[in-house]
Each structure stands twice: as C-alpha cells, then as structure tokens.
Amino acid sequence: MKLDPLSLQLFVSVVEEGTIAAAAAREHIAAAAVSKRISELECQLDTTLLVRSNKGMTVTAAGDALANMARSVLSDLDNLALQMKDFSSGTRGSVRVLANISAITQFLPAELKSFLADHPMIQVQLREVASRDVIRGVAENGADIGIFTQMPYRDDLQVSRYRNDELVLIVPAAHPLAALDVVSFAQTLDYEFVGLHVGTSLNFQMLRSASELGRSLKLRIEVNSYDAQCLMVEAGLGIGLQPKMSAQTYKSLAIKSIPLTDPWAYRQLDICVRSYETLSPAAKLLYDHLLQHQ
C-alpha cells in the first residue's frame, strides 16, 4: 500500500480547518478534488476518517491518529527536500510556529524580521491560535515551536519563559472609567465587554476572575483580533482588556488605555517545543533566536 503525500496533506488540512471548503481554499484546490482524495484515502485504508453530517464534519478516532502520524511524515518529507537543496547557499529549512495573538501582535514581527534577515533561506510558517491550541499543536507535532500565555501544559513538552506583558483596560474616550488613572477589574464589571473569542487565555482569565469576585462577566461581543476589539470599543459597544503594547498600536483611535491594578494583569508568555534535541537545524536557530531576544 502506497499513500500519496498530497492526499495526506489535504486530509490534515481538512482536520485543521474543520471543513472541506476551508481546506480547499487553504490548499488552492477545488473542494470536489479534496473530497475525492479523502474518499479514496478512506477506501485505501478501509477506515472511516471523517463523519459527515448536516451539522458539519467530525474526525473519528482513526482519523485523529492518522492526522498526527501524517503531520510527522509530511514534516520529515519537507525537511528532507529542503535539506537536499543547494547546501552551498547557506542554512535552509522550514519551521512551523504556533503562537497566540499576544505574541504575534507584540513581539514576533520585530523578532522574525531580524531572524529572516540573518537567515533568508529559512521559511517560517506562522499560525495564530489560542494558547490551549498552541500547547496541543506542538505536543501532537502540528508545529515545531509554540508560544502561549502561561497556563498548565503537558508533561511531554519542554517549556521556557519567553516574555512578559501587561494587560490594560481600553475604554471609549467619553466612558465614565476614562477619568481614572488606574482601575481594578472589579470596577469594570458593571459595564459590558468586547472580548476575544472563547478559548483564549484572556477570555478564560476574565471569566475566572469575575467568578472569584462573585460577579458575572457582561460579554456583549466576541471578536478575533485586537484591532477589531479597539474599533468596537471606539464605537461605544463595550470596554475591553488587551496587552499594553498592542493597545499602543491603536492610540490614534478615540480610546483610552488604563492600567489594571490586579496582579494577574502582569502575565508571562512561554515558548515550548517537544524536544530541543530533535528539532531541525532551522528550528533550533529560530528557537535560540527567540530566547536570546527576551
């Protein structure tokens, strides 16, 4: 039995994107072709990998196992092809990175710019996901390096401190809280929030802190980015929390950033790998670069 790497790649894309249409768009191929490849793969393996229904698509236990193995195989193939090309041109390779929104908006742009300037032959594949998905993705070989806001992690990962950041409250310029120089989270709970989507560490922290105060969080709108959050706040649709450095990016908007007095507003971001020793040369270079720029 010979499995086609393209079919494996398309299958992994379907698992990661959640739908055949999204996977087809990611891989720049017709949805019908993706569906045919998946059906042929199931027939070849004599195993159901995906359960399709009018509510969407569910990955079976066999499909989940295949996705994990396929990621490893595809990564090995990519590294094999890249390492065999023109060694005389310098270090080559491809590094898969998962990072949360806080790392991407605050630290990674400058750090990746300097890294790629020194290593132009290395390709960095960066994807933004929630912190919990960063941990899972690296542990299951969906990425080489992960960066997430400090939270419980798996024992099979090597984790080091990456950076620190500070959360601030953002409010419309005319909001009652805008008159304050500092604010506690408890003072914000009388107002409606524009929050990040469920699954982010910040969303979890806000819900937990509100619960510890015996209060509920009035989450009016959920968004997927800090720029969307700032625009919603400026429009008067609520208040929000985000890292100080990210909020500074949008200082031209009619919003005000106010420091939080709560200890949990000062956060640690961590960087993780499955095993430093087994990283590709390119991944080791990027990992070392990121730790050197703490």
Image: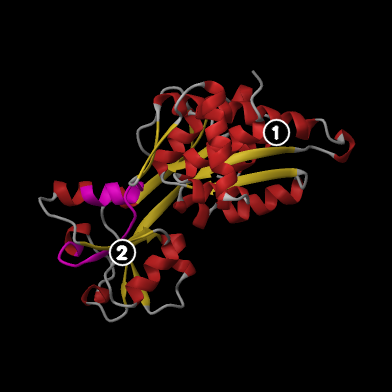
Amino acid type indicated by mark 1:
Asp
**Residue 97: % across, % down:** 57, 41
Q: Magenta region: which residues? A: 188-207
Residue 286 in picture, x, y percent from top left: 65, 39
Residue at (50%, 57%) from the top-left corner?
105
Residue depicted at 44% across the width and 27% down the height: 48
Residue 5 covered by magenta stretch: no
Q: Does the magenta stretch include residue 193?
A: yes
Q: Is label 1 or label 2 in front?
A: 1
> Dot 1: what SS?
helix
Q: Where is residue 136 in the image (x, y as percent from the top left)?
A: 43, 33
Q: Quadrant of the N terminus?
A: top right
- Considering only vertical position in the picture, is 39 above or below 129? above
The crowd level at tag 2 (other Cα within 10 Å; few <14, some 14-19, many 20+) is many
Relative to residue 50, is residue 278 drawn left or right?
Answer: right
Q: How far apart are marks 1 and 2 (CA)?
A: 41 Å
Q: How many marks?
A: 2
Nearest the camera: 48 or 61?
Answer: 48
Q: Name the residue under label 1.
A: 78
Q: Where is residue 218 in the image (x, y as percent from the top left)?
A: 19, 61
Residue 143 sits above or below residue 216 on the image:
above
Q: Name the residue under label 2.
A: 240
Q: Where is the C terminus found, in terms of image quarters?
A: top right
Q: Observer-nearest residue: 230 or 294?
A: 230
Image point (66%, 21%), residue name: 2
Closer to the camera in the image, 134 or 72: 72
Q: Check if mark 1's residue and mark 2's residue have beta carbons within 8 Å.
A: no
Residue at point 33% right, 50% down?
A: 202
Q: In this view, does 288 lie above or below 230?
A: above
